[in-house]
Image (cartoon, rainbow, N blue to C red):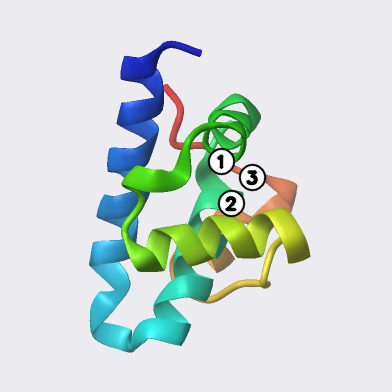
Amino acid sequence: MSKSTHETLIRFANQIAKNFVAIGHDKAVLATADHIDSFWDPRMKAGIFNGDPSGLDPIAAEAIEHLMKKGNPGSQTRATDFSKKGELHNSDAG
């Protein structure tokens, strides 16, 4: 994976985490993990899991760690509930 691709994934993860910061740290970690697991393409997930995590904000870093160690935390938002209706599992990737 190129450095610019990894930097893009870091930026995406940090943006997701920032959107959830208002719900509190622990809930934001789980919501960020849920969003990444639900919407990111497997290649994106592999890229963020296997790259240097030093650019991740604390919430995003904990979300990635959670996914790597424990897997999906279950639905945390109505958005991910919606994405899984009818056996569909949509992706953020083009």
Q: Are marks 3 and 1 in contact (CB under 8 Å)?
A: yes
Residue under the image location 60 percent in, 25 percent down? 43
Vertical side of 4 occupied by 45: above or below: below
Do residues under tags 3 and 2 come within 8 Å of each other at their CB atoms?
A: yes
Q: Using the rendered view, name the quadrant where residue 69 is placed.
A: bottom right
Say the numbered circle drawn on residue 89. Answer: 3
Q: Which three-letter amino acid code belongs to the residue tagged 1?
A: Asn
From the top left corner, tell me how far across and down residue 82 is, in percent: 53, 62
Q: Residue furthest top?
A: 2
Label number found at residue 38 = 2
Q: Is residue 2 left or right of residue 90?
A: left
Q: Which of disc 2 and disc 3 is earlier in sequence? A: 2
The residue carrying pointer 3 sits among few (fewer than 14), some (14 to 19) or many (20 or more) residues within 10 Å by Cα, namely some
Q: Nearer the viewer, residue 45 or 88?
A: 45
- Say above or below: 93 vs 59: above
Query: Distance between the Cα atoms at labels 3 and 2?
Result: 7 Å
Closer to the eye: label 1 or 2: 2
Query: Quarter-wise, where is residue 70 in the image?
Result: bottom right
Please state which of residues 54 and 14 is positioned toward the viewer in this rendering.
54
Name the spot of residue 37 as percent of width and height, x first.
60, 51
Where disc 1 sits, the SS reads loop
Q: CA distance from mark 3 to mark 1?
A: 4 Å
At a point 60% along the width and 40% down the height, the residue shown is 49
Q: Amino acid at mark 3?
A: His
**Amino acid found under the numbered disc labelled 2:** Ser
Mark before the other along the chain sequence, 1 or 2:
2
Q: Are marks 1 and 2 in contact (CB under 8 Å)?
A: yes
Please state if 6 lies on the left or on the right of 8 as rendered. right
The disc label shown at residue 90, or none:
1
Q: Quadrant of the C terminus?
A: top left
Residue at 53% x, 74% y is 30
